[in-house]
């Protein structure tokens, strides 16, 4: 009987020690397939490019919104000086606008990294988003030009006409920046 108890005690000690030995054994490092390694590399490149484009877009947006808070041409005291000042303001705003829109469009056209089986589907998604964006930009550009034309026509022949057109153009670009920042919140801020 003592032999049976000793065997049970001995077996009871071996089993837990055997499990402990298995837990302490180094786990095998997972080896990626070439497709998985390529996917990881492309993912890293995608997110790096996305971060750079996001930073570019947000910087242009923030710069323009800070400018918009200030008075436009506060020291201009004649119609001529207002027109000249607004011309310079439009140049800066256009630069910020084009930088923002270009970065956003590039973000939308970046193909998502995909494993070989998913490449066709993922590529079409990026192409589709960029195509939608291009279409909306074309429609918006026509709308903005027409709206400013209507505003200018009210002052046709007057010396203030160029100022009205310039102020309309500034308002339209800044409003579009805000609209795009809201519509594309996900890509721009997340």
Image (spheres, helix red, strand yellow):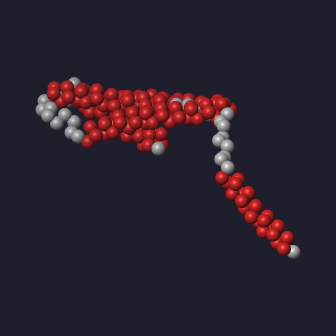
Q: Is residue 16 left or right of residue 46?
A: right
Which x, y percent locates residue 39? 61, 33
Q: Is residue 129 above or below residue 185?
A: above
| Residue drawn at (40%, 29%) of the image | 141
Corner quadrant of residue 67? top left
> Quadrant of the image for the N terminus?
bottom right
Q: Residue at x 39, y 33 (%)?
A: 56
Residue lying furthest front: 2
Measuring 16% from the left and 26% from the top, which residue is drawn there? Answer: 80
Q: Nearer the viewer, residue 94 or 114?
A: 114
x and y percentages locating residue 66 in the rendered image: 28, 40
Find residue 130 and report its horizontal and vertical position in percent: 51, 30
Give above or below for 69 relative to 137. Answer: below
Q: Position of residue 152 (x, y in %)?
A: 28, 29
Q: Is residue 104 left or right of residue 154?
A: right
Q: Nearer the viewer, residue 175 or 126?
A: 126
Q: Which quarter of the figure has residue 140?
A: top left
Judge from the rendering whether residue 77 lies leftward or rightward of residue 94; answer left or right. left
Q: Which residue is farthest bottom?
A: 1
Q: Residue at x 56, y 31 (%)?
A: 42
| Residue 12 in which image quadrant | bottom right
């Amino acid at each position: 009987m003592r032999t049976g108890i000793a065997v049970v005690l001995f077996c009871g000690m071996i089993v837990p020690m055997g499990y402990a030995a298995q837990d302490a054994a180094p786990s095998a490092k997972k080896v990626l397939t070439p497709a998985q390694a390529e996917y990881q590399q492309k993912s890293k490149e995608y997110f790096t490019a996305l971060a750079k484009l996001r930073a570019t877009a947000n910087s242009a947006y923030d710069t323009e919104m800070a400018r918009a808070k200030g008075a436009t041409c506060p020291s201009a005291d004649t119609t001529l000086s207002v027109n000249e000042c607004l011309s310079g303001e439009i140049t800066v705003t256009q630069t910020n606008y084009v930088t923002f829109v270009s970065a956003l469009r590039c973000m939308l056209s970046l193909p998502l990294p995909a494993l070989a089986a998913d490449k066709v589907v993922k590529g079409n998604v990026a192409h589709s988003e960029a195509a939608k964006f291009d279409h909306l930009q074309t429609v918006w550009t026509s709308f903005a030009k027409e709206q400013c034309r209507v505003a200018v026509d009210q002052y046709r022949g007057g010396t203030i006409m160029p100022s009205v057109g310039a102020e309309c153009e500034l308002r339209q670009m800044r409003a579009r920046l805000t609209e795009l920042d809201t519509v594309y919140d996900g890509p721009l801020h997340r």
